[in-house]
Amino acid sequence: MYLITLDSQTDFESWRKTARALALHQIAPADVTWSVQGRAKEAAPAGLCEAPGIPPIETDGTFSVPANFIELARIAALHRDGERFALLYRLLWRLRTDHDLLETRADPDVAQATAMAVSVHRDMQRMRDVIRFREIGREHNAHYAAWFVPEHHIVEFTAPFFARRYADMPWSILTPDICAHWDGHAISFTPGISQTEMPAPNRLEETWRRHFPDHPITPEAPKKSHRNLSKASILEPLLADAERWTGGWITPRPEAPMKRKLAADDLDALRKEAAHCRACHLYKDATQTVFGEGPKSANIMLVGEQPGDKEDLAGHPFVGPAGQMLDRALEEAGVDRKKVYVTNAVKHFKFVPRGKVRLHQKPNTPEIRACRQWYEREVSAIQPDLIVAMGATAAQSVFGKITPIGKNRGRLIELPDGRKALVTVHPSYLLRLPDPETKVLEYQRFVDDLKIAAGLQKKAARAA
């Protein structure tokens, strides 16, 4: 019998190396007990020997397992179940002779490992969704802290996401298991703490509440508010990830076509559904889905490109510099902003990090196509008379193909469903113009385009 003691709860690489050595020397799963450094060794069964007793690995000894098993095992190893390493070694042992084992849907070991991976992945997404930092200290000495209770050993794995997301501020994520810290250059980890050691809140608490009114979860919220997030709303995309891990066979839900039309009073439900969209990879780095906003009775829909840095953090469209310019132009054109629905062709912020700055990146065609379902469903919910496409990305989404701005702007174009479309530039284009005179002229052209929308809005008001 062998007792294998790993260095930590997340020491997957040591497990992988040791499991390979055990399998190469034909040491069966029943002859191995897995433990983690820090557990009481007196609790181990008598007669076990430590891992160094394994004979040296012969250089010509080798075997292979499916690549999706390694990915599945890496995630499942973060589960809190104390028997996870034994389960994964049992699967590894069996995969040597049954290379297609992961395709066996009813196999208990496969089903259990997959369920573990899904649970871990759900916990990672929960961590991304609910973490809210509060400011500790003032001005140059400010630090940001958040309290989180993970279900599994996910903090080390998920911390790089927050380093990318909040690269320009020093932060700490404090948990009972382990604490993650970012100083602007590197991530470090310290032992976990109790919630009573969490620093007291101050200014940042109110800032978060002001910008995220729809997210009531705060660091002081009862634990059940953290743990009992609705599984129904996020289970489907998580199971989709599980299908990728296990070769595409896990399908515990009936296949059903996506609903393409919603009644106007279902716009809120549509927004909640989009919050968990995984149709393309952009959700992985974005803070959140930024859905459209405006009255359900709007007869004009403005479509932009994608949320920017400010929108990504705030969760609302057109709240940054481009949004301020749009508001000013709408007012000058005579469009009542409160009666307009505003959205974007792509609902997640696409960017590349450059030090402490997140540089905007233009969405590509696959990303626009992946997100077009939400634009189509917004149109079905709002039923606008006029759709204003601001910029090339928006025009591609509205018309379903690449549509040049120059030769199509400034005139009403009829869409296949009978609605009218208007093509113009995106307000961010005006912000980028270096020449002041050109900027003035182009801004006036933009206002003139919006005056067409104003005329339609006034006509509809008179008809009502």
Image (cartoon, rainbow, N blue to C red):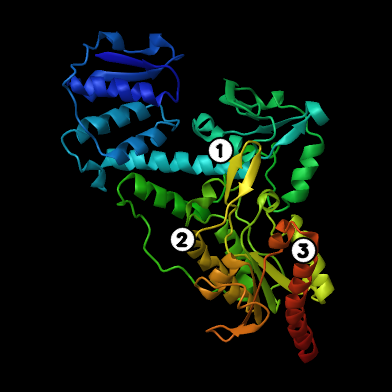
Quarter in which the N terminus is drawn: top left
Measured along the vertical axis of the image, is residue 199 above or below residue 351?
above
Quarter in which the C terminus is drawn: bottom right
Q: Position of residue 362 (x, y in %)?
A: 57, 56
Which element type, helix, strand or loop, lies under badge 3? helix
Q: Earlier in the sequence, mark 1 or mark 3?
A: 1
Residue 77 vs residue 408, the one in the foreground = 408
Q: Position of residue 181 (x, y in %)?
A: 63, 26
Q: Quadrant of residue 433?
A: bottom right
Q: Earlier in the sequence, mark 2 or mark 1?
A: 1
Question: How far apart in space, not on screen, are marks 2 and 1 (Cα)?
Answer: 23 Å
Q: Quadrant of residue 346?
A: bottom right
Q: Locate residue 225 relative to residue 27 in the image: left or right.
A: right
Q: Residues within 10 Å of mark 2 (few under 14, many from 20)?
A: few
Do the CB atoms of the residues marked 1 and 3 lie less than 8 Å apart?
no
Residue 332 vs residue 281, the one in the foreground = 332
The circle drawn on residue 259 is none
Do the CB atoms of the residues marked 2 and 3 lie less than 8 Å apart?
no
Q: Position of residue 114 (x, y in %)?
A: 36, 42
The circle drawn on residue 439 is 3
Q: Residues within 10 Å of mark 1 (few under 14, many from 20)?
A: some
The circle drawn on residue 161 is 1
- Residue at horizontal 58 percent and vertical 48 percent from the top: 351
Q: Which residue is mark 2?
A: 366
**Front disc: 1 or 3:** 3
Q: Position of residue 328 (x, y in %)?
A: 82, 66
